[in-house]
Amino acid sequence: MQNIIEDDAYDLAIAKAEKIGERFTEPRKLVFQSLIKAKVPQKAYDIIDYVSRQSEKTTKPPTVYRALDFLCRIGVVHKIESDSTYSICSHNDHCHKANHSPLFLICKECGDVEEIHLSDIEDSIENAAHKKGFSLTRIMIEAVGICQNCAQK
Ligand SMILES: [Zn+2]
Ligand SMILES: [Zn+2]
Ligand SMILES: [Zn+2]
């Protein structure tokens, strides 16, 4: 059973895809679903495993990678580079940017990841790159430490 928040994230993702004339194909749907269900960032092989179990046909890893690329491209999923995991964007519905570069606070104890969008940091990176004549493809801002929950234990 999906709860309200999960349904919202799902509807939002579909709306974003439709806006650029893309469909939420079966693999895209299943990949997104696996990330929503997991609640914590997932490695690609965990997602491949989930998708294979859910679909009738065998799912080849490249299909899952293509779906992940697509979901990242439209900004509903982020890739966390430092540990190669994927996470549902938790900020989409209230962001002024179509596709933002968030800061990830990654807890090294429990693996919890918190997403915060710091527009001013993103803007200054964009400006600095622009001044150097550098065209950005992607910005990754990741911080590792101990989350509040783990610190209180
Ligand atoms: Zn996000
Ligand atoms: Zn934002
Ligand atoms: Zn923690």
Image (tube, rainbow, N blue to C red):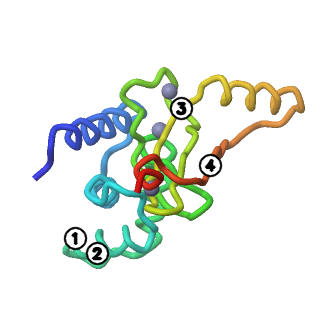
Element type where label 4 sits in the image: strand
Mark 2 lies on residue: 52
In the displayed image of the protein, which residue is found farthest to the left?
Answer: 1
**Front residue of this view, candidates 144 and 31:** 144
**Front residue of this view, candidates 6 and 16:** 6
Q: Which residue is at a point 45% across and 46% down the rendered structure image?
A: 148
Frontmost of labels 3 and 4 is 4
Frontmost of labels 2 and 4 is 4
CA–CA distance in space, label 3 to label 1: 34 Å
Mark 3 lies on residue: 117
CA–CA distance in space, label 2 to label 4: 32 Å
Mark 1 lies on residue: 55
What amino acid is at disc 3?
His
CA–CA distance in space, label 3 to label 4: 13 Å
Q: Are marks 1 and 4 in contact (CB under 8 Å)?
A: no
For label 1, the crowd category at 10 Å Cα-Cα, with few meaning under 14, some 14 to 19 and many 20 or more, is few
In the displayed image of the protein, which residue is found farthest to the bottom?
Answer: 58
Residue 86 image label: none
Q: Is residue 65 above or below residue 125?
A: below
Q: Is residue 27 left or right of residue 79?
A: left
Q: Are marks 3 and 1 in contact (CB under 8 Å)?
A: no
Q: Is residue 42 above or below residue 148?
A: below
CA–CA distance in space, label 2 to label 3: 33 Å
For label 3, the crowd category at 10 Å Cα-Cα, with few meaning under 14, some 14 to 19 and many 20 or more, is some
CA–CA distance in space, label 1 to label 4: 36 Å
First reached walking from the N terminus: tag 3 or tag 1: 1
Q: Which residue is at a point 68% across and 42% down the rendered structure image?
A: 137
Q: Which residue is at a point 58% across and 40% down the rendered structure image?
A: 103
First reached walking from the N terminus: tag 1 or tag 4: 1
Q: Are marks 1 and 2 in contact (CB under 8 Å)?
A: yes
